[in-house]
Image: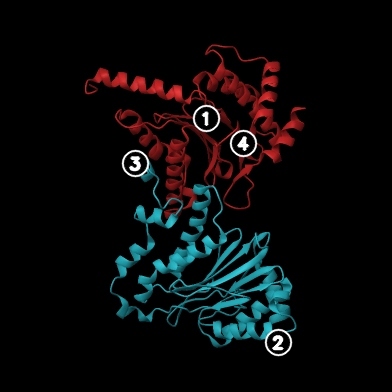
Chain colours: A red, B cyan
Amino acid sequence: MIEEPYRWVEAIANRREYIEHQLASGSPITALTYRDGILLFTLGRERQKLFEIYDRIGLGGIGHPGDIERLRMAAIEVASTEGFTRSAHDVSLRRLANYSLSPALKAAFEQVYGPPYLARMLFAELGRNGAPNLFLRLDYDGSIHTNGGAFGRAHEEFGVIAGTAPATAQMELFLREKHAARRPLEDALAVAVDAWTIGHLALAGEPNDAPPPAEKIATHRDEQLALTSIEAAVLETASPIPMTWRMLPDREIRPLLEKRLS
Amino acid sequence: MVPSTLRADGLTAPDSGDFAALLRRRGHSPDRQAGAAFAGTSAHASFIETHATTILAFKYADGVLVAGDRRATAGNVLVYDRADKVLEIDQHSLMAIAGVPATAWEMARVLEHSFQFYRRSQLAEMSLEGKVRALSKLLRDNLGAVLQGIGVVVPIFATYDHAGATARLYFYDAMGAQFEAADSAATGSGSPAVRSILHYENTWGKKPLAKLKEPDAVVLALRALDTAAESDTATGGVDRRGRIYPIVKLITKTGVTTLAEKQLARMFKTQVA
């Protein structure tokens, strides 16, 4: 049946709808530049969503745990092999996403008799020697969205993913307005938790809702903070060793965040 | 390059977390390449010096000290006088090498990447026993090159055991057998002299090695290496004109530290020379 072009397009559209539905409840993830590097942030109840990929690359993923796991392993394998056979300086997120992951995702998505990946990923790469940080969203169909800086689009110091496109758009809108790159960790945490809250509210709302008012954000944020644990990690510029990744345990940053919010 | 994990078979490879296996799968395995290139060279390879160096390690009051001379030789030719044979594998582990440099440095590189790959992929630090075994396995995989006479490596591995709050020291033979050293280990052509000195100091010295404070431990290491260089041509002593000093590294509970050349020069001047 899908030998006919129209059927194929229809099958792809159905598949897209199915995957979007599966991803729709995904808890938002934010990555943003702060004074000492990059902060990756989300709230959750169960499984780990933020991962180290290489010395200067981190990953946040939503979707099916099995698919995230395979893509995470693939990314680590490609980066580690490159880092070993050439050097750690040759490992780049741009190449990893464009040449390895994206084609594999696209192929799996469009081969309609095989299973697609139920995954949406946010990668962050700490720039070397003052080069700008790269935030890259990689979707189940292999499409890539970056934080710009080329082709006339202004460079942004953040990247987000969420279960739905409206949630993503609202988070981006908020961060464009409120996020400043040169602030200390507690400020970045405060902005990240609000961005998360906005994304989380938008998941339950209608597509064309206006951004929620500040009081609503604060109430929802405090409710959710009480129910969930904070998952955060940083890629630190000043790390004395080549590895820059560090997980920030809830008990370490919750007091910091609460103090900043009160 | 589509990563092998993303092929349609679905299941993660059973060797997940094993970096050496990943390299083999991708055709980057160093032992395979070396084996193919040098098959059948054993008859001609005997000229390559295999153990020409001196490496020593002993436990002292704060952890473990690992030191090595800087000379690299091939037969009676001095190839390089600034070789670093004490290599950092991770923040708490050192591998010191005696043997064929190409193989040894490659081994250290594989080991370093193995620990990192394991941590990233398995989301946990490799256990101490796992790390010690990983080096043993690399040595065993290298057996072909050893038998051909071209790739002998005899390393020392030192690390800090956070669970037991103590430093641990291991030495290996060329086939991969691992031995845990109670207080000291030495390898390379200059090691007989060093082993004698360390044994003497530990048994009849003012203090056993494990009680030595850092400065005394460093002075002892420098004196021992200088003694080895006195009778072994393959061990580089201190090059006073070139200001080349041995490499001395320490592992304590806070991690690995490398002694600065200036500090070594001062100690050498006042207490060794």
Spatial CA span between label 3 and label 4: 31 Å
Amino acid type shown at disc 4: Glu
**Depth check, front residue: B106 or B147:** B147
Distance from Cα at disc 1 to Cα at disc 3: 29 Å
- For disc 4, the chain is A
For the residues beneath circles 1 and 3, the answer to whether they share a chain is: no
Quadrant location of the C terminus of chain B in the rendered image: bottom right
Q: Residue at x 53, y 61 (%)?
A: B131
Name the chain under label 2: B
Residue B5, quarter of picture: top left
Circle 2 crowding by C-alpha within 10 Å: few under 14, some 14–19, many from 20? few
Marks 1/3 in contact by CB < 8 Å: the verdict is no
Same chain for mark 1 and mark 2? The answer is no
Q: Is residue A8 visible?
A: yes
Q: Are marks 3 and 2 in contact (CB under 8 Å)?
A: no
Q: Helix or strand or loop: what does disc 4 sit on?
A: strand
Q: Position of residue B186 (x, y in %)?
A: 56, 78
* Residue bearing the label numbered 2: B204
Which callout, 1 or 4, points at the residue further toward the start of the chain? 1
Q: Residue at x 67, y 21 (%)?
A: A220
- The residue to which callout 1 is attached is A147
Q: Which residue is mark 3?
A: B7
Q: CA distance from mark 1 to mark 4?
A: 22 Å
Amino acid type at image mark 2: Trp
